[in-house]
Amino acid sequence: MAHAKGCLIMPNPKSAGLTRQVQGIDHSGELLELQVVEERPLTIWLNGQEIVTAMTIGDYPEFLAQGFLSNQGMLAHDEVVQSVEFDKELEVVVVRTDRPTNYEAKLKKKTRTSGCAIGTVFGDIMEGIEGLKLPQTHLRTSWLYALSHSINQMPSLYLSAGAIHGTVLCHEDQPLVYMEDVGRHNAVDKVAGWMRATETVGSDKILYTTGRLTSEMVIKCALMGIPALVSRSGFTAWGVELAQQVGLTLLGRMRGHRFQCLSGKERLIFDAEVTLPDEGSKHQRKSAQ
C-alpha cells in the first residue's frame, strides 16, 4: 500500500489475518457483521531458552521479539544478533545471539504491569534506568499539532476494527514507523525492535502512543533513548515521577491543539498558534441533533 510521505511503516487494515468477520446483533436486535481484531500467541525464545508467550495480532513478529528482549534488558545494545527466525505454524520466534544466555533467575521475578492484554516485566522493573538521563532536546508545539493531524488521518486497525493500540516513532513533525497491537506494550516493543534492527537512534525522536502514560511506558521509552513521549491518554503518578527522574518530556491528553505536560515543560517551544473548537457552536450542534 502507499505510505504517507516519509512514513516507512504504517498500518494496513486490509492485511490478511489481522481481523476476522464476526456476526452478532446490535442494541435494537438487528443483525450485524463486524471486523474484529485477531489475537494469537507468539512464543519468544532467546537462543535455547523460552522467554515468554505474548498475545499479539501477529504482524512484525521479528521486530516484536527483538524489541521485547531489548526493553527487558536481555539484549544488550552492543550485542550482535546473529539471526531472527519466525515459524508461522508453530507461532514461535527465535532470536540467536553471539553469546550464551541464562535468565532463569530473572524469569522467576515477574511484575504484572498495567498494560492491556497483561504486560509483564521480568526482573527489577527499575533495572537499566537508574542514573539514566535522556538528551535535553526541545519539542516544538508545531511538530505536535502536525503529528496529531497526520496520525489521525492515517488508515489503521483502530479506525476499522477498534480494540487496539498504536505507537508511532516520529522525527520532528514526520511520522516514521506506525505499529499497532492489542497491548500498547507490544506496539512499543515493535518500534524498539525496528530501531534495533535498523540501528536507528532515539535521541532526536518523539514517541507517540494511544495508551496510558504508565511507569512501564515511561521505562520503555527511556530505555529506547527517546526524550519525548506523547499520548492521547492520561498519566499515572509513578509514570510522571519516573519521567521527571530521567528527564523525559511527557505530554498527555493530546487532542488537536490541547495537551497537558507534566514533565519537561521547560523544553517546550510554543511556536504555533493554538486553535480550539468553538465550544458554543459545538453545544448548539449537539442541541440541534
Image (spheres, rainbow, N blue to C red):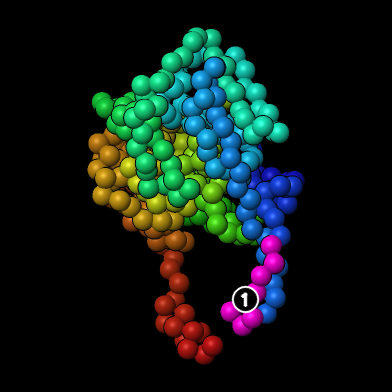
> Which residue is pictured at 70% across the width and 76% down the height?
31
The segment highlighted magenta reads 22-29
Residue 37 seen in render: yes
Amino acid carrying mark 1 in the image:
Asp
- Kind of element beneath mark 1: loop
Q: State which quarter of the image contains the C terminus.
A: bottom right
In the image as oriented, which residue stretches furthest toward the bottom? 288
Using the image, determine if residue 168 lies above or below residue 86: below
> Which residue is pictured at 46% across the width and 14% down the height?
101
Please state the horizontal and vertical placement of residue 18, each as a whole percent of the image.
67, 49
111 displayed left or right of 90 = left
User: Splitting the image into 4 quarters, where does residue 255 fall?
Assistant: bottom left
Q: Is residue 212 magenta?
A: no
Please state the horizontal and vertical placement of residue 115, each as a whole percent of the image.
42, 47
Please state the horizontal and vertical placement of residue 234, each as a whole percent of the image.
36, 56
Which residue is under mark 1?
A: 26
**Residue toward you, 136 or 66:** 66
User: Splitting the image into 4 quarters, where does residue 22 fall?
Assistant: bottom right
Please state the horizontal and vertical placement of residue 280, each as a whole percent of the image.
42, 82
**Residue toward you, 271 or 135:** 135
User: Splitting the image into 4 quarters, where does residue 56 fall?
Assistant: top right
Residue 209 seen in render: no
52 displayed left or right of 36 = left
Using the image, determine if residue 281 lies above or below residue 209: below
> Which residue is pictured at 60% across the width and 47% down the height?
39
215 displayed left or right of 95 = left
